[in-house]
Amino acid sequence: MSGINDERRESLDDNFVNAEMATSADENSEPPAKCCSCSSLTNMWGKYDHSFMTLYCLQYFNAGLKILIALAMMDMFKNDYGLQPTATQVLMTFVFFPWSIKFFFGVLADTVPICGSRKKSWLCIMGCLQFVSMITLAILTPKSANVATFYLTVSVGSGAFNDVIVDALMVIQAKRDPEKGSQELQTLAWGTSSIAMMIGGICAAFLTEFLNPYYCYVVYGLFGLFCVLNAYLLNPEIEEDEDLPDDNLAVDAVVNENDIEAELVESNPPAHRRTFCQELKHNYRIIKQTLKIPAMYNALLFFILQGFTVPSFGEFFYYFSTEVAGFTQFTYSMLALVGSFSFLIGIILYNAFFKDTDVRKLLFAAILIGFVGSIFSLMFVLRLNIAWGISDIAFVMFTGIITDTFALAFSVVPPLVLFAKITPSHVEATMFAFLTSIINAANSFPGKMLGAAINKWFVGVTTEDMSKLWYLVVI
């Protein structure tokens, strides 16, 4: 199941950081009253702009559908192109790399208006790119895996770009209800993404098993076109936020709030008049000042060290599951559906029981759980479960739910909450884009590339010979 957990985790990291960043300023407010789902949706529909609500749900549904192309890619690279596990892992790392540079997408959208719009036009363009790239890949079915990777990267990058823009619109709309606006909008986002992941897993199960993985790309591309139509109907009046604080005050807030001596800075032009280079300089100043907070740079250092020292072998387990354990594409995709449920359970457990627990204790518990999960993986690879009379499906489902659920509750969510608590007010948007870029990059790129390099240079696991996979599990 770890073959798709990295992609799912990136999406969840983005959503959770976004939720905590948006609500950190409202921690002292009274908790919202509980109400039924239908009543809550009705209230939100009457409170926020209708065109935004429609686009918001569609975009987060689109983000959740990444699981659809993640499953289709592994099937395509393995069966259509005959790639080895190492090559598949490297190519999939590049496909999802755009989620690691979301910060620059935000700067570009803020400084380069198209047809007088900084959001609506970009939403339409990126939705069209998603549609064109996916349909082209499905129709042309390129003979080169590198060409297919290019089309997939363009599609995933367009989704990441639109995610940044929709997040910015959410921040603006949430101000219509300062007490609970950000919380209820993020609840809606979580629910929509979760539904999309489950639907995507079911669709991938049928399409990859009984038809062709290229049909998954058609579905994802058509949904991109649907997002374009809704972006075109977006109310242009909701694009700008007139209540943003002065730029220099935002920088001063970072400094004064944490007793850090401010550097002398010259005034910037208004946000809507800054050039691309001026916007980069402005954001650099904010990030530089914020990273002087010890808790901030220590937490970032944790993610970076984790990414560069812990190798990932997710795609190797996909090959083992289908080649050795005999899982069909349908079975593997349905197990991904179970994984989506386990992540949701982890979030519920954290909010219910562990949100007030010290982060260091939770991380220590996560290390122990990770060790137990590695033992389960080693047992699966060595086929000990079969020797004990436990079927592969039952073993993977049971152990995967346990490790995935508690890994999220103890290792993923707590550090993100810590980021939200120590980030100063007035600069949440800039730091959110920066932090999610760092987290996405640390969780995916270095670990996967390190894992591929270790296998290529030292171990040598191939599709034909998976006997040494247990070496990678031990590593």
Image (cartoon, rainbow, N blue to C red):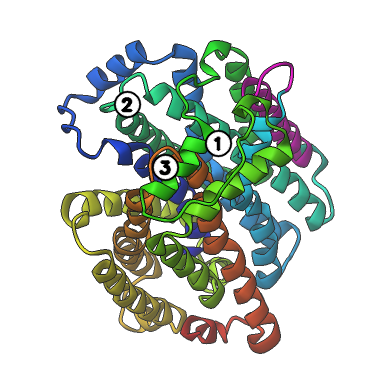
Q: Amino acid at mark 3?
A: Ala
Task: Give residue 188's position: percent from left, percent from top.
Answer: 36, 30
Confirm or deny contact between disc 3 and disc 2 (CB under 8 A): no
Q: CA distance from mark 1 to mark 2?
A: 19 Å
Please give the label number shown on residue 214.
none
What residue does disc 1 label? 163
Q: Amino acid at mark 2?
A: Gly
- Outermost residue, front side: 264
- Residue 444 horizontal side relative to residue 387, left or right: right
Q: Compare residues 57 and 88 and report the one nearer the observer.
A: 57
Q: Earlier in the sequence, mark 3 or mark 1?
A: 1
Q: Secondary structure at mark 2?
A: helix
Instruction: Please rate how many residues cluster around mark 2, counting C-alpha atoms within 10 Å: few if below 14, some from 14 to 19, many from 20.
Output: many
What residue does disc 2 label? 181
Which segment is the magenta one?
114-138
Q: Main secondary structure of the magenta part?
A: helix
Residue 467 visible? The answer is yes
Q: Earlier in the sequence, mark 3 or mark 2?
A: 2
